[in-house]
Image (tube, rainbow, N blue to C red):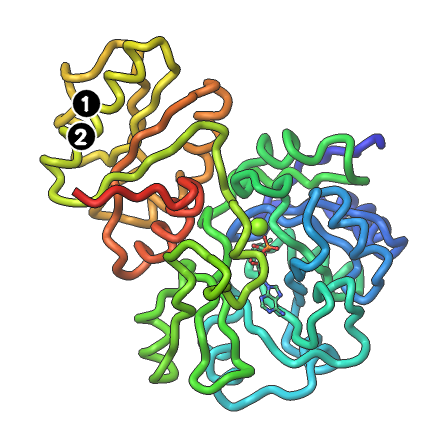
Amino acid sequence: MNTVIEKTSETDIDMRIIRRAAEIIRDGGLVAFPTETVYGLGANALDGEAARKIYAAKGRPSDNPLIVHIADLKMLEPLVQEISPVAETLMKKFWPGPMTLIFKKSDIVPRQTTGGLDTVAVRYPSNQIALALIREAGTAIAAPSGNLSGRPSPTEGEHIIEDMNGRIDMIIDGGTVGMGLESTIVDVTVQPPMILRPGFITREMLRETVGEIDVDPAILKKPDAGFQPKAPGMKYRHYAPKADYQIYRGKIEKVAQAIIRAANEKAAQGFKTGVITVDEHQSLYTDKLHRDVIVVSMGSLKNPETVANHLFKVLRDFDKENAAFIFGEAFSEKHVGQAIMNRLTKAAGYQVIDL
Ligand code: TXA
Ligand code: MG
């Protein structure tokens, strides 16, 4: 399939591009577009056949439901059965923004969009290109992250082109996204509400707004027969680089020592090897690593948002380098750290080594 690729910027949106993209959505086609979290792969959420095409383009299992994106609060009501007071409070505080809420779905939302579930995930993004596209299309847009299934989510135009060129009708390249982590998912069909996927909007922020909040215990643990995450997508190996990636957790001096030993061993055997650290710890590795080891800082501990911003890009860059092994430091699970560790733990296939 020939994919039309168009560039535009959030601060100076080319409406000709948006109108063309909106027409494709209305006609049942697929358009990738930037949001403030990651790039999405969109189709008309109310057209089951169009939503079905998303699964094919991504290579995504069809039991994994999509997130429905809206461009104002009025678009929510027809999609859901009820909006609880807790949901209202959360919407007022965090929409538009990186929060997805799970509601009981209405009849107009097709099961292809919800992966066969009776509930629907809805998000009101804040990215101006996403909003313009939804408004111009005149319909809610179902959009999972625009990566091929299993790969790290796309946070740059280059990533979405890499994964989707030739598979969909159009890509809107809006440059690098602002946040780099997918939205926080909160199930408001249960009381207290439950976080199904951590993100930029943290447990602490949600608690401050509505009081009690549960967290799906599956968020940081490996799913098994007795223990399945409530968001179907969270059970798949995900965000995975091609390399074997191990995370070391403990006192930083010990962690750095273990990483140096492991990385040097692999590099000496001739394997392309990488190390993931942070700005503050880089000096611990200076002059201690085999010269072929690639050391990358994911960001600064003083500003964990920078780690979130770079996380998927760093994993993709290691793929480009054809890294066979990656050894990395763990992060604190406070605040946005919970989302960071959730994504990294999955990327590592749950290989977290406590020292
Ligand atoms: O930031 C985001 O949320 C991005 C951008 C594009 O908006 N989208 C995104 O979509 O991350 P996706 O498809 O990659 O992840 C959606 C997650 C999956 O884990 C899926 O299982 C879960 O949301 N989900 C969707 N609908 C659900 C539902 N009705 N109940 C429980 N989980 C649901
Ligand atoms: Mg995804």
Separation of marks 2 and 1 at Cα, in angstroms = 5 Å
- At label 2, the amino acid type is Ala
Q: Is residue 346 above or below residue 190?
A: above
Quadrant of the rendered structure where residue 262 is?
Answer: top left
Mark 1 Cα shell of 10 Å, populated few (<14), some (14-19), many (≥20)? some
Query: Is residue 31 or residue 61 the one in the foreground?
Result: 61
Q: Are marks 2 and 1 in contact (CB under 8 Å)?
A: yes
| Residue at point 72%, 77% (across, down) | 79
Instruction: Name the element at disc 1.
Output: helix
| Quadrant location, the C terminus | top left
Residue 257 is situated, as x and y percent measured from the top left of the image, at 14, 29
- At label 1, the amino acid type is Arg
| Residue at point 53%, 55% (across, down) | 235
- Is 237 positioned to the left or the right of 201 in the image? right
The residue indicated by pointer 2 is: 258
| Residue at point 69%, 81% (across, down) | 80
The residue indicated by pointer 1 is: 261
| Quadrant location, the N terminus | top right
